[in-house]
Image (tube, helix red, strand yellow):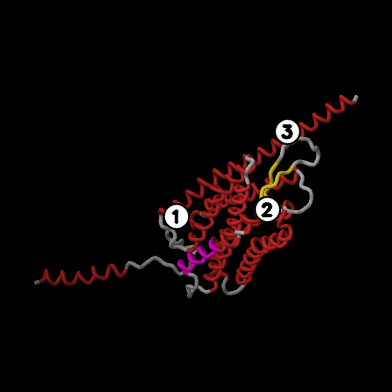
Amino acid sequence: MNTSMNWSFMLNKSAVSTSEDNFFNAIVFLDAMSCVFLVFGNFFILSLIRKKRLLGRSTNVFIFSIAVADFLNGLIAIPTHIMFLYHRETIYLCKCFRFVSYLTKTVVPYTIVFMTAEKTMRILCPTREIVTVARCMFCTSLLWFFSSSFNIWSVVLFTAVPIISPKNESSSERTYKRCVFNQRFLSLHSFFLLMDLFILFLVPCTVILVLFLVLVFKYFTILRERILTYFFVVKLLLALSLNVLITHAPYQVMTFLENSPHVQSTERFLLSNLLTSVFFTRGIWNLVIYGYFKHYVCQKQNLASIRAGNCPPKTESFRLPLHRSRPSNARQNMM
């Protein structure tokens, strides 16, 4: 009787571990596919902008910044995350993964904030060019400098911690590794978690929401026709903002749960990696958005339906010398 009970317990244990391993491998496969799409897709976007010299427009400056962030995710963050999960000595892979992911998590929302603010100013003040292309480039470079210096704390605080499922304390149980806050800095956990939530998520989302509310309020005033001319760009900004909100919000929630001082379980570990994979798919959805708005994102000339007041140059001035030369030729024939 005891032998049969032990045998059934071992079968259940092997079935649970097999299902966990299959789910774990599926998450890694999703990360690998995201890595391929992000590297090749964003490399195509960057090469297209460079080849056609599209940085002369403010929109493409911000698109270039977002594409660089997604390219770094596919080139560095995702591969280091996969290698971290499959290797033993992975403390440096953990720090590299956290730094690059936090860097891109800062750059993308604030780039959309700058992009939305620039378009809002163009709608509200069309006669004054407050934000030029050179200023957009300066703000973007300043944003990258701020993001790299602000997220340097992730290199110090995060470390690799092994975790064993509390269900069965057996040596045959698979040991997973987590990249979480170091317990030596336990007093700083709550401070940096709140700072991460406030600065990297709540502030950019709130600013974007306020700017959209301003456009909605101005739509019912005299600026309605002017906003309609920029409606294609507003849809682009709305799509990018919703993509950031959908992919970042679960990742922010899981950051709190993953770094909580309570006992960690295998289910929470697998859920954390799944939401991390969803966070990395943000770049894939950005590529889909670029493809849908290709008539505005990758066009060298402005569309007449998007920007108001940009009419093509008149050709009447080129015909004036021809009209003036005809009487002189006629006089020469008369003589």
Q: Residue furthest front?
A: 184
| Residue 215 - label | none
Q: Is residue 124 left or right of residue 331?
A: right
Q: Is residue 55 above or below residue 219?
A: above
Work out how far the residue at label 1 is from the one at label 3, CA to CA, in angstroms: 46 Å
* In front: label 1 or label 2: 2
Q: Residue at x 58, y 58 (%)?
A: 108
Numbered badge on residue 49? 1
**Residue 282 versus residue 211: which sits nearer the camera?**
282
Give the percent coordinates (x, y) of residue 23: 70, 38
Q: Is residue 66 magenta?
A: no
Quadrant (top left, top right, bottom left, bottom right) of the C terminus: bottom left
Q: Position of residue 321 (x, y in %)?
A: 24, 70
Q: Residues within 10 Å of mark 2 (few under 14, many from 20)?
A: many
Q: Quadrant of residue 152?
A: bottom right
Label 1 residue SS: helix
- Please tell me whether mark 1 or mark 3 is closer to you in this view: 3
The residue where tag 2 is placed is 251
Residue appearing at x 12%, y 70% in the figure: 332
Q: Which mark is residue 18?
A: 3
Q: Residue type at mark 1?
A: Ile
Cα–Cα gap, marks 2 and 3: 26 Å
Q: Position of residue 128 (x, y in %)?
A: 48, 75
How far apart are the two marked residues, 1 and 2, measured between alpha carbons?
A: 30 Å
Q: How many marks?
A: 3
Q: Amino acid at mark 3?
A: Thr
Of residues 31 and 159, the one nearer the viewer is: 159
